[in-house]
Image (tube, grey):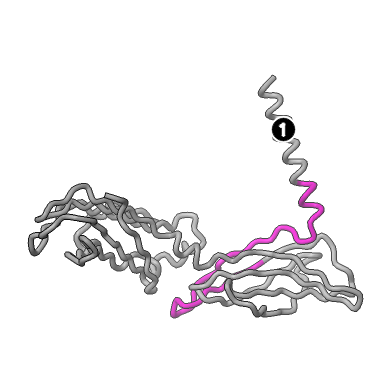
Amino acid sequence: MECLLFVYEYRLSDTLNEFTEEQRWVRKSFFEVKDMGSEAEHVKVLVTWALGELDRKEQLYFLYREQGTDEWEQLEVEEVETLSYEIELVLSIKGNYETQILAVSEERKRSEELQYLSIFDQIQDRIHADVYVYSYSKEYMDLHIMMQQYSGGHMFLQDKELLKIMSAEAHVYINDELIKNVDVLAESNQAMDMPHDQMYEYNQRIHFDEEIEELGDVRVDLVITDGIGIEYKKTNFDY
């Protein structure tokens, strides 16, 4: 009985979702990063969507702006197929963007949000790192770092060579005083070399150049840089 109830609730949920989709004016909105510019500062983005209806007297516009700004850029659009549309944009790789659709006629104006183009957010989400300090004394520290660049199934897959990890440095602080800089990438082991991934493991005892006078708060700031110069920062978990 419980299984039948679950199936019924699942099908009811699907039916409600389909009904909600049919009531929307803007439907099936989607965006795709096509490729990066030659200098890796911009990306080409294809935005597609469909409408439930549009009055013949209405002119349709696509509006976009970088998150945190006030002014909208406005572009006129035409149908690709019946009530289906697409537009290609060239956007900064270091921005996220809001978009909306605006329909204008002599009688009325109406608009609706379309897509949030999370370009920079997804660039940042490609790199993952964990930093652990297992033990330390006045002479040394046991440090473990895992770093991964993940591209599989990602919208930047075609640009993985540009976006690969190029450098990684750990800055070791005790009582907010810089004690040691470590070239993590040069001294780490490549734990994985898959077609779409990089994974590195650093697990070493670091000997300090001078004995620490007084033990106290410890902090390790890991700074990773990719092939286009974007930095990714991670601090160790509390010791």
Q: Residue at x 14, y 53 (%)?
A: 205
Q: Residue at x 59, y 64 (%)?
A: 32
Q: Residue at x 38, y 58 (%)?
A: 149
Q: Quadrant of residue 102?
A: bottom right
Residue 132, percent across and down? Answer: 27, 51
Residue 137, percent across and down? Answer: 13, 52
Up-down relation of residue 118 to residue 204 (above or below): below
Residue sticking out furthest to the right: 107
Seen from the viewer's position, the closer of residues 192 and 165 is 165
Q: Quadrant of residue 68?
A: bottom right
Residue sticking out furthest to the top: 1
Give the residue pinned by disc 1.
9
Asked if the magenta segment contains residue 62, the reply would be: no
**Highlighted range, magenta:** 18-47
Up-down relation of residue 4 to residue 186 (above or below): above
Residue 18, percent across and down? Answer: 76, 46
Q: Is residue 156 left or right of residue 24?
A: left
Residue 155, percent across and down? Answer: 51, 61
Seen from the viewer's position, the closer of residues 97 and 30 is 97
Q: Quadrant of residue 55?
A: bottom right
* Number of numbered discs visible in the structure rendering: 1
